[in-house]
Image: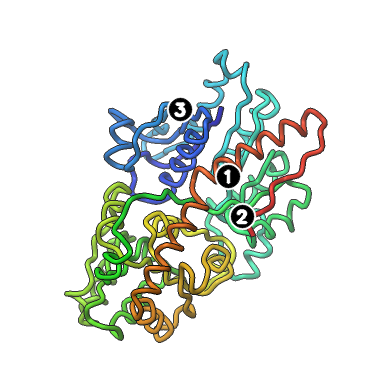
Amino acid sequence: MWLIINKRPWLTNRAMVNISLQSAYGLAEAGERVEFVVAGQTQDWRADMRQHYGLEPHPRLTVRVIDRFCLGRVSSSLPIFLYPFIRSRSRRFAREPMNILSRDSGMLPYMVFLKFWGRARIFLEVHHAYANLPRLRAAGLRLSLEEKKNYLLERLFCKYLDMLVCITAPQAQLYQEVFSNLPKTVLPLGTRPRPSLSAAEKFKKRTLVYIGTFSMGKGIKTLLQALTGVDPGITLLIIGGSSRTANATVSQEIDSLGLTGRVRFMGSLPPAELYRICATQASVGVLPLKDTFYTRNLTSPAKLGDYQSFGLPVLASRLPTTELLLSEGEDAFFFQPDDVQSLTQAIKRIFADEERFVQMVRAAEAHGRERSWIWRAEQLINLSQSLSLARQGDTVHLLKRYD
């Protein structure tokens, strides 16, 4: 039995809830019983899964949508974090092992209590490196008040985890410097292979797609500038956005570069609609990350999983994190981060040869199948079973890290 806990709102277009849901769904597909616990309200979570997330409800997966505690302007995730204690009162909980996985450091004290009180196995999936504050400061990063709270929680409670799940190998090394004896594994975010256009149809579309926000480190301006230097028949879809100010700035940039007819700015979309567009309109995914401490060490881009789910070759900034997940000339072409000319040449190159493009689509499809959410779930299950054996006194070797 697995509990996957995410304190963010259920019906959101942002990636983090969808990532946790995909993880829960993969575990159900791999044969586990799963409850996905999330904040918010719903009339029918099964309908939400179909219409908003593009997933058919699975018989082994239940979604528990729990309202946050609100008093005036004060809002708390406490009801979400306390749900496992309510769940632990059932007889079934006592009869079978409980695995609890969360990406929220705020859940750590509750998970640790459940480990010792309810004999649960506890996993934290990290998407930052809060515990290694010296390295973050040395890189010039400033933590918000919430992030400083996460630092304290991780330093106090991570040592009690059964497993720390990292999404990149450099991230695991940052945690190794702080918790040398803590069991760790590296599991990049997964893919969900889906039907899409044939390779020949993708080539004819000549349409780049960018998914994500416009925040620091994303490189959207570099992408727009590079588009001005390639054949006018190559177009761009932008799915996502940030604040109204950031969206307006990008719209102004599109106009000032004379790209109004070549760029479709589609705004933030529910995952189901995003998938439909990727399946029917996209040729190539673009990952124009800037070279920062975060992108070099801490990111396994959710958008990369989306691209590979639809067999899209990828144009990606050359960084340690992207080089671990993509292969030059097979499923991707790399370019220098924040270099307009380098990205321009990569765009020209990927559409220069249809036969090579078709081969790249096939490689992207194959690599997407290799790193699916089901594969990732199977690794988590194997790790959980290994921990069970270790508790029984057997010697267990952890899975080889994805590095």
Amino acid marked by disc 2: Tyr
Contact flag, marks 1 and 3 (Cβ < 8 Å):
no
Query: Disc 2 marks which residue?
Result: 130
Q: CA distance from mark 1 to mark 3?
A: 27 Å
Give whichever of discs 2 and 1 has the lower sequence position: 1
Q: Is residue 396 left or right of residue 343?
A: right
Amino acid marked by disc 1: Ser
Q: Residue at x 26, y 83 (%)?
A: 231
- Residue closest to the eye, 271 or 145: 271
Amino acid marked by disc 3: Arg
Q: CA distance from mark 3 to mark 2?
A: 34 Å
Rendering colour mode:
rainbow
Residue 185 in the image, given as x and y percentages of width and height: 66, 49
- Which quarter of the image is occupied by the N terminus? top right
Q: Residue at x 28, y 71 (%)?
A: 250
Q: Is residue 23 left or right of residue 224?
A: right
Give the crowd class for mark 1: few <14, some 14-19, many >=20 residues within 10 Å: many
Q: Residue at x 69, y 38 (%)?
A: 162
Query: Disc 1 marks which residue?
Result: 105
SS class, disc 1: helix
Query: Disc 3 marks which residue?
Result: 60
* Viewer-nearest of discs 3 and 2: 3
- Specify whether residue 245 is in view: no
SS class, disc 3: loop
Contact flag, marks 2 and 1 (Cβ < 8 Å):
yes
Q: Residue at x 78, y 48 (%)?
A: 181
